[in-house]
């Protein structure tokens, strides 16, 4: 259903669901310990359209299928604003469903960048299924402008026996 891929702007009443998505995203792909307070501050600001926003796939009051957190900020060397993608997350049960949810969230992010007239910084920081994610981003954004490297950390969770 194409309806499933409609993206709406998140509102403050989405906070509980977005905290659930953020927690799942950090559990699945985080490489350092997550702070519930930090996530709450970032999400709450975006849901109140304070230096950012959230694009959400799903109807208000229903469990979201996925979301993107976009925040405005500045590079360390400039006063010019940029749009920073902080996270795109699709709940696992919707990743293989028709409708291209990750692709739609990428397109939504580009649309926000175009509407604001500021550059978008978006990327893949993952050691899990990285090649597929990078290919999706290359189809959406073109060739990458660099790469991320993790030293002393991994986004792939291992059991204590594997250490």
Image: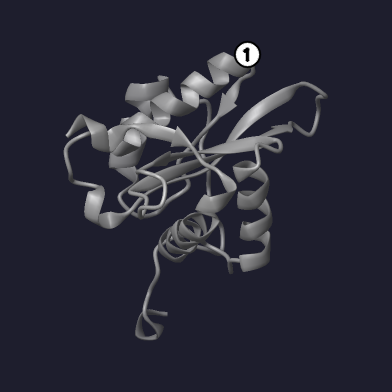
Q: Is residue 117 above or below residue 37?
A: above
Q: Quadrant for residue 119, please give it.
A: top right
Is residue 77 left or right of 114 when viewed as pictured?
A: right
Q: Is residue 125 above or below residue 80?
A: below
Give the residue displayed 53% in from the left and 23% down from the top: 112
The colour scheme is one colour
Is residue 18 left or right of 12 when viewed as pictured?
A: left
Is residue 22 left or right of 43 when viewed as pictured?
A: left
Q: Is residue 45 visible?
A: yes
Rate crowding at label 1 as few (under 14), some (14 to 19) or many (20 or more) other CA atoms within 10 Å.
few
- Quadrant occupied by the C terminus: bottom left
Residue 11: give x, y in percent of width and height: 55, 43
Residue 108: give x, y in percent of width and height: 44, 27
Q: Quadrant for residue 132, please give it.
A: top left
> In the depicted view, which residue is nearer to us: 8 or 96?
8
- Quadrant occupied by the N terminus: top left
Residue 87: give x, y in percent of width and height: 50, 45
Residue 61: give x, y in percent of width and height: 41, 52
> In the depicted view, which residue is nearer to us: 72 or 128?
72
Is residue 74 left or right of 49 when viewed as pictured?
A: right
Give the residue displayed 43% in from the left and 44% down from the top: 67
> In the depicted view, which residue is nearer to us: 117 or 33?
117
Secondary structure category for the residue under label 1: loop
* Count of numbered tags: 1
Give the residue displayed 36% in from the left and 53% down from the top: 62
Residue corresponding to mark 1: 117
> In the depicted view, which residue is nearer to us: 82 or 163?
82
Q: Quadrant for residue 93, please give it.
A: bottom left
Q: Is residue 35 visible?
A: no
């Amino acid at each position: 259903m194409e309806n499933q891929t409609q993206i709406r702007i998140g509102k403050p009443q989405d906070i509980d669901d977005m905290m659930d998505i953020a927690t799942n995203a950090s559990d699945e792909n985080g490489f350092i310990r997550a702070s519930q307070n930090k996530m709450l501050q970032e999400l709450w600001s975006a849901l109140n359209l304070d230096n950012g926003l959230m694009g959400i796939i799903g109807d208000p009051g229903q469990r979201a299928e996925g979301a993107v957190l976009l925040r405005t900020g500045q590079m360390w060397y400039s006063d010019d604003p940029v749009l920073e993608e902080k996270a795109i997350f699709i709940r696992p049960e919707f990743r293989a469903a028709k409708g291209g949810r990750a692709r739609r969230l990428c397109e939504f992010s580009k649309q926000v960048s175009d509407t604001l007239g500021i550059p978008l910084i978006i990327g893949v920081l993952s050691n899990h299924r990285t090649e597929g994610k990078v290919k999706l981003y290359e189809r959406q954004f073109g060739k990458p402008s660099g790469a991320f490297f993790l030293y002393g950390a991994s986004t792939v969770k291992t059991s204590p026996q594997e250490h």
